[in-house]
């Protein structure tokens, strides 16, 4: 299926096993939220998503597999991410501590540090994050 050329990509993590798991969780309905670093949006000069915007969910092969619509976007300190958001990320976390540990591992990884241009980047309680909620409006695959 061909998407409208103006539909921006919705990319979770980096291509590979993690993205594949996250895309599968979105398609199954388990994943309805995601969290990114405000610093990553700034480093990539990407505008923050807004409620009502539609995006093409991209798999590891670069193929669009669904259309998602953003339903809510909040910028908040990492320490303020709550259990509902963590659970709705669809990765099986039952506590905010579990969710945070997995996200810190990703955010402290070499790929993201390269995007940020800071090989020593670390997050803390005050680190601004972008907490986004979304829904699948159309499956393409």
Image (spheres, grey):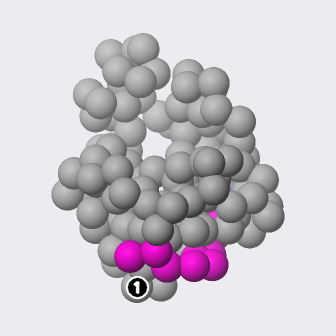
Residue name at image x 68 percent, y 61 percent: 54
The image shows residue 126, relative to residue 61, as above or below, that is: above
Could you say which quadrant of the image residue 100 lies in?
A: bottom left
Left or right for 107, reference 35: left
- Expressed as whole percent of the image width and height from the top left, the position of residue 75 reads 72, 47
- Expressed as whole percent of the image width and height from the top left, the position of residue 83 reads 55, 72
Left or right for 65, reference 35: left
Can you see residue 26?
no
Which image quadrant: the C terminus?
A: bottom left
Q: Residue furthest front?
A: 2
**What is the magenta segment's predominant secondary structure?**
strand
- Expressed as whole percent of the image width and height from the top left, the position of residue 126 reads 62, 37
Q: Is residue 133 magenta?
A: yes
The image shows residue 132, relative to residue 45, as above or below, that is: below
Residue name at image x 67 percent, y 47 percent: 6
In what element is the residue under mark 1? helix
Left or right for 32, reference 91: right
Residue name at image x 37 percent, y 57 percent: 63
Q: Is residue 17 magenta?
A: no
Residue name at image x 46 percent, y 68 percent: 1
Highlighted magenta segment, given as a residue range? 131-141
The image shows residue 78, relative to residue 38, as above or below, that is: below
Can you see residue 114?
yes
Residue for badge 1: 28
């Amino acid at each position: 299926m061909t998407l409208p050329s103006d539909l921006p990509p919705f990319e979770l993590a980096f291509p590979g096993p993690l993205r594949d798991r996250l895309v599968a969780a979105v398609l199954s309905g388990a994943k309805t939220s995601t969290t990114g670093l405000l610093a990553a949006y700034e480093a990539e000069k990407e505008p923050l998503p807004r409620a009502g915007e539609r995006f093409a969910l991209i798999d590891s092969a670069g193929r669009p597999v669904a259309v998602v619509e953003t339903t809510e976007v909040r910028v908040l300190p990492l320490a303020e991410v709550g259990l509902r958001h963590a659970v709705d990320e669809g990765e099986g976390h039952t506590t905010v501590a579990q969710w945070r540990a997995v996200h810190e591992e990703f955010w402290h990884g070499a790929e993201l540090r390269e995007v940020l241009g800071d090989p020593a980047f670390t997050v803390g309680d005050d680190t601004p994050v972008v907490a986004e909620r979304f829904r699948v409006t159309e499956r393409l695959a």
